[in-house]
Image: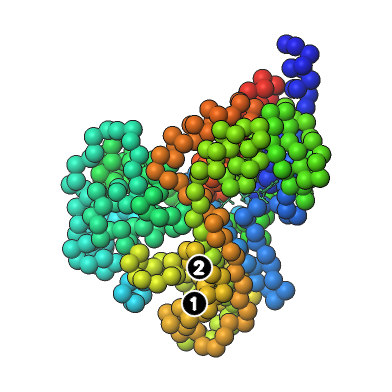
Amino acid sequence: MTTQQNQLEQLPTIVVGAGMTGLAAAWELQQRGVPYVLLEAGDYFGGKVQSEPTEDGFLVEKAADAFILGKPWALELAHEVGLREELIHPREDTKKLYFLRGGQLLDFPQNLKMFVPLDDESFLQSGVLSPEGLKRMLDEQHVPPKPPTDEDESLASFITRRFGEEAMNFIVPLAAGIYVANPHELSMKAAFPQFLALEQKYGSVIAGSRATPRAQGPIFGSFRGGMSTLANAVAEKLTGDVRLNTPVLAVHPDGVTVAGGEKIAGSGVILTTPAWYAAPMLRQSFPKASALVGELKANGSVAVILAYREGQFPRDMHLHGLQVAADEGIHMKAITVHSAKMHGRAPEGHVLVRVFFKELEPQTACAEAVREVERLFGAQGEPLWHAYADWRGKNPAYQVGHLEHLARIRAALPPNVRVAGASYTGVGIPDCVNAGRTAARDVVAALGVAG
Ligand SMILES: Cc1cc2nc3c(=O)[nH]c(=O)nc-3n(C[C@H](O)[C@H](O)[C@H](O)COP(=O)(O)OP(=O)(O)OC[C@H]3O[C@@H](n4cnc5c(N)ncnc54)[C@H](O)[C@@H]3O)c2cc1C
């Protein structure tokens, strides 16, 4: 090993961004005894994960409000940082969901695995599609599988091919929701490889879902103090060089330049910001990777948060919320009644509602949210307060061919420089945690240091 290599290996690995991906990357480096510097542009940890207590006793989640337990990485991290006792789950006693179709609040079909009906009978009675649409969706069991192929396809192509065109109205809100995606552009291989695998293995998504047992116990988890609990707990346990209010301007093979011009030397760099921030940082030293990262697209959403007194509603508001049919012709996509879905999100006798829109001017979204809660649940009078989280242009969009594009990005970067996070390998919190830790392991392996 040369002296120069030795020197490089003594230098820290630099992690850019302290969202869940960056925090997980730093944590993994720390676990392996590898020195690191974590640089975050903002003045808090967690990035998009933002749980904000209000003075009047509500807890507002501006983005993620829960994480899926079937992908183990977020739960594992929570256990490692001592949050076992803080874990909570969506309430079972209020687990009522509606589907808004044709202006009617319909009971959500029972016995679904994501969007896949596990028994024909209850699905046929549900009314979430026309009788022909429901029947065609169930006929998926008899649609022959596509011959094995490596070619990607869009969510829309997959749904229409297997479940019929009308099924788009039911499946898209459930499947594409977290991606805020255009179903005609969303990559099946990147977003839903499990359904492609079921088609190949069992010949049908429905048959495959019915053949594989459903996990026992809760499907989602969160924390008493909200999702930021995880980010803050990891940050508190980081003993390395951690700097808030430190925007990175450029990434080089041997370190980064931060605002103000300081150059921080590093043996490797893990860049965990969304692609639209990463592309300019890579431009100077890695123009090809920068151009490829810059081609990744984003969609947008706006979450409106409304607080009410229980007495403003003529009906019981102990329900989880509703999903809106894709062809409903309104801007609103979904409502979560957060006060009923999770314990500790609103003071006794109050209701906290989150209303989701795709790209929409936030003031318009707030006005529409108030009108929709009045129309659908009969809310009387104005909300006690309203707030919004503006995620326009901030939801990574995985276009058809996404995985091949990622391979090109990886090939355009040296092994000690990695991009990781929601723009690349999954937007959910568990995927981001896994991405951060994997990137850390990759960089450690590339440097050949102990760990
Ligand atoms: C409305 C909404 C609801 C969601 N709901 C859920 C949910 O219920 N469950 C779930 O699992 N997921 C959910 N998600 C997705 C999930 O929250 C995100 O995908 C995830 O938090 C992204 O983490 P990240 O670390 O990859 O990126 P980010 O959280 O975007 O973190 C990137 C960090 O990089 C920093 N940064 C940017 N530029 C620089 C720079 N130049 N120098 C240094 N630092 C920089 C940013 O300040 C930020 O802190 C939701 C997302 C949204 C928008």
- Establish if 40 lies above or below 352: above
Picture coordinates of residue 315, whole percent (x, y) = 46, 83
Position of 99 compared to 35: left or right? left
* Quadrant of the snapshot with the N terminus: top right
2 or 1: tag closer to the N-terminus: 2
Q: Residue 337: x, y in percent?
A: 51, 71
Q: Work out whether 65 lies above or below 204.
A: below
Q: Is residue 32 visible?
A: no
Foreground residue among 113 and 325? 325
Q: Amino acid at mark 2?
A: Leu
Q: Residue at x 44, y 34 (%)?
A: 404
> Which residue is denoted by mark 2 in the rendering?
360
Residue 428 placement (x, y as % from top left): 52, 49
Q: Residues within 10 Å of mark 1 (few under 14, many from 20)?
A: some
Is disc 2 in contact with disc 1, using a CB cutoff of under 8 Å?
yes
Give the residue displayed 48% in from the left and 81% down from the top.
Answer: 371
Residue 158 to residue 323: above or below? above
Q: Is mark 1 within 8 Å of ligand 1?
A: no
Q: Which quarter of the figure is the C terminus placed in?
A: top right
